[in-house]
Image (spheres, grey):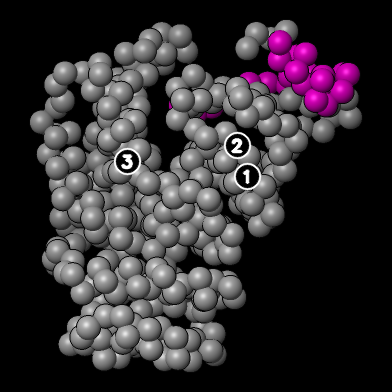
Amino acid sequence: MEKEEIKSLIEKVLGKGSEIVSPLVGGMMNISYIIKDKDNKKYVLYISTEQANEMVDRPLEKEHQKIISAIGITSQNVYFDTENGIKINEYIEGQSLDRVSEFDYEKVAMLFRELHSSPVLSKADYAPFIRFTETYEKEALSFQTEVSPLYKELRDFLFAHKEYLEMQRKTLCHNDAQRSNIIQTPEDEYYFIDFEFVGNNDPIYDVACFGNGLVSEGRKLLDSYFLNNPSQDQIKRFYLWRIYISLQWYNVAVTKHYRGEGEKHGFNFLDVASHFLNNAKDAYDGYKLEIKDDKVMDDTEKLIISTLDKIRHFLRKDGGDCEFVSFNDGIVYVKMIGACQGCSYAYSDIKDLVEVILQEEVPGVVEVRLAE
């Protein structure tokens, strides 16, 4: 949009005397401006790129914005053009975490847990692997006939774990929860922005998103998210999702380069692609260093997980949930999360609900216990 078009739009929405304050350093999917009305109240105007509009379901994004606003972890939307991907949201005073050197990992983890505890889910799953093959990679390969050996090696490793990742418990997720999409206020409070990719997904995917700059930052957030006691399974999923996200953004950057968007915006997207390929390699190295038992999930474990997925809506009614940890000698170990974590009724939920149904549905299950 030209400056005069922007001026006309914001005056239409916010009234006469509204104006642009300054451009914002946007991500790879938006051009953004801080704007204000005649009373000097600030807002943010987002103008989506052509590529973003091809990838995003705007009416669904509008619904997600309402859900997350109701939780209290973002600002209110005041204008949403679902046809063109143009939005105006109330401005959150502060800085995005990619612009600050110090922040509170515990508070950021709490923000993530609030989102993932939402009793309202999206109408749609994020479906990362469908997105990867049918959108990001497909488009990048339309410009590149050959890929680097490192990309192929990491992709093959990731897709060997595809079924395992797709089986995981799903919550409402941001799915682009990198540092640039989290605002730190002067009072050290934290809020999400930018909801183009919200959908139901493994919550650890969001934690992995935080490692866009450095994998170690996402790994540190994983510790905070699980109160400094993540399981091997949770660490494993973190590194696998980090590889996925890095290869996804590698493909996006390659596409943007060949579309000529780098020249248009004065940005070298091949450098961005190189960063994300190296980031994926760092995640792979972390996986090999930390994961000691890379066993393949057997049929019984898959049936346990799918059965838990069918009954978790009973727990979510009260803001809780449970997650499969392991299955050994007929005993299923689960971790209670959300409102169920530390709840005096958690033992009853396990014995009277989870255990009874798993014993009926899964041959070989004799007991369900809380994981330590």
The answer to whether any part of residue 372 appears in the image is no
Amino acid bearing label 3: Ile
The answer to whether any part of residue 313 appears in the image is yes
Q: Are marks 1 and 2 in contact (CB under 8 Å)?
A: yes
User: Relative to 290, does residue 177 appear above or below in the rendering?
Assistant: above
Q: Which residues are magenta?
A: 5-28
Q: Residues within 10 Å of mark 1 (few under 14, many from 20)?
A: some
User: Relative to 99, does residue 352 appear above or below in the rendering?
Assistant: below
* Residue on which disc 3 sits: 130
User: Image check: 223 left or right of 296?
Assistant: right
* Residue on which disc 1 sits: 63
Q: Is residue 204 magenta?
A: no
| Residue depicted at x 69% and y 44% | 75
Percent from the top left, x then y, of residue 267? Answer: 41, 16
| Residue depicted at x 18% and y 66% | 297
Q: Residues within 10 Å of mark 2 (few under 14, many from 20)?
A: few
Q: Which mark is residue 161?
A: none
Q: How many marks?
A: 3
Badge 1 marks a residue whose secondary structure is helix
Percent from the top left, x then y, of residue 220? Answer: 38, 57
Residue 225's image quarter? bottom left
Amino acid bearing label 2: Pro
**Which residue occupies the foreground of this view, 69 or 199?**
199
The residues bearing labels 1 and 3 have C-alpha atoms spaced at a distance of: 22 Å
Q: Quadrant of the C terminus?
A: bottom left
